[in-house]
Amino acid sequence: MVTDYDAGETAQLYQRAKNTLPIYQVDTYSLMQRIGDVSSLKVLDIACGEGHFTRRLRRAGAAKVVGLDISEEMIRLARDQESADPLGIEYVVGDARTAADPPSDYDIAVAAFLLVYARSRDEVATMCRGLASRVRQGGRFVTITVNPDLYFFDPAPDYRKYGFGIRLANHAYDGAPINFSVLLTDATLEIENYYMPLETYREELMSAGFADVGVYGLSVPPHARADHEPGFWDVLEAHPVFVLLDCVKA
């Protein structure tokens, strides 16, 4: 079942998870390191959620940052934080699958966990066309997404110490569910993502007008490594749950 971030306390639980669980220390550091210097750039955070990365991008020196998300509740949370701590960020409710008309000219578009909601190659293609319509020629698209190799790790890793568990279908197929149980101290948040091969993402990004599509691994931040006993991150590093894609608009 598609995760509804407007239902109940889903958005609030996700916000808490991003700020507290070990895995999100790694995804935050990895994506920000991959993005690099955004000084004076015009940045679009697609599927921005409650603004976790949006705020970091603005604080990192981006000249303009806009957050886009299909969830009204996520955008409400993001706007609440902007009101409490104004950074000059604009948050917009919108669907990344819909092409920008007229096309936008962002220097870089960023997305944390967007492509994982595509359940078919056609849906990936639609997302990629929407992304391409928002980035200027020579601009970049950088995303962190679920690693499709989760379906092929044998034996299946136990990720619970990082704050989540995973349930998979019996075998991999386009649109096969990847169900995350995000383990908060007093609640469990269920998130459903979907399997697609990395090559499908790469091919559809290129078909939409991107080039030089690179795939990159996770990086554990030094402070997170220091906060835990030796070997704590070994399972995650040997069996990375996320990967990053970085490409340029041709």
Image (spheres, grey):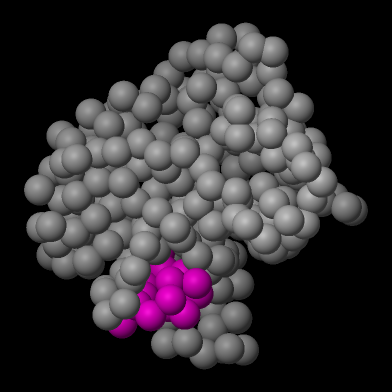
Examine the structure image and report whether residue 227 is included in the region drawn in magenta.
no
Quarter occupied by residue 9 = bottom right
Q: Does residue 72 appear left or right of residue 37 in this picture?
A: right
Picture coordinates of residue 57, whole percent (x, y)? 43, 71
Extreme right residue here? 186
Q: Nearer the viewer, residue 245 or 185?
A: 245
Is residue 162 visible to the viewer in this orientation of the structure?
Answer: yes
Quarter occupied by residue 235 = top right
- Residue at x-position 51% and y-position 22%: 149
- Residue at x-position 37% and y-position 27%: 198
Picture coordinates of residue 152, whole percent (x, y)? 55, 14
Picture coordinates of residue 209, whole percent (x, y)? 13, 43
Examine the structure image and report whether residue 60 is included in the region drawn in magenta.
yes
Q: Nearer the viewer, residue 64 or 229?
A: 229
Relative to 58, say whether 126 is above or below.
Answer: above
Q: Does residue 41 appear left or right of residue 232 in this picture?
A: left
All told, the count of numbered labels is: 0
- Residue at x-position 79% and y-position 50%: 228
Relative to 151, say whether 36 is above or below.
Answer: below
Q: Nearer the viewer, residue 195 or 98?
A: 195
Q: Does residue 201 appear left or right of residue 7 in this picture?
A: left
Picture coordinates of residue 192, whole percent (x, y)? 60, 35
Relative to 194, say whether 189 is above or below.
Answer: below
In the rendered view of the protein, which quadrant contains the N terminus? top right
- The residue segment tinted magenta is 54-68
- Residue at x-position 56% and y-position 9%: 171
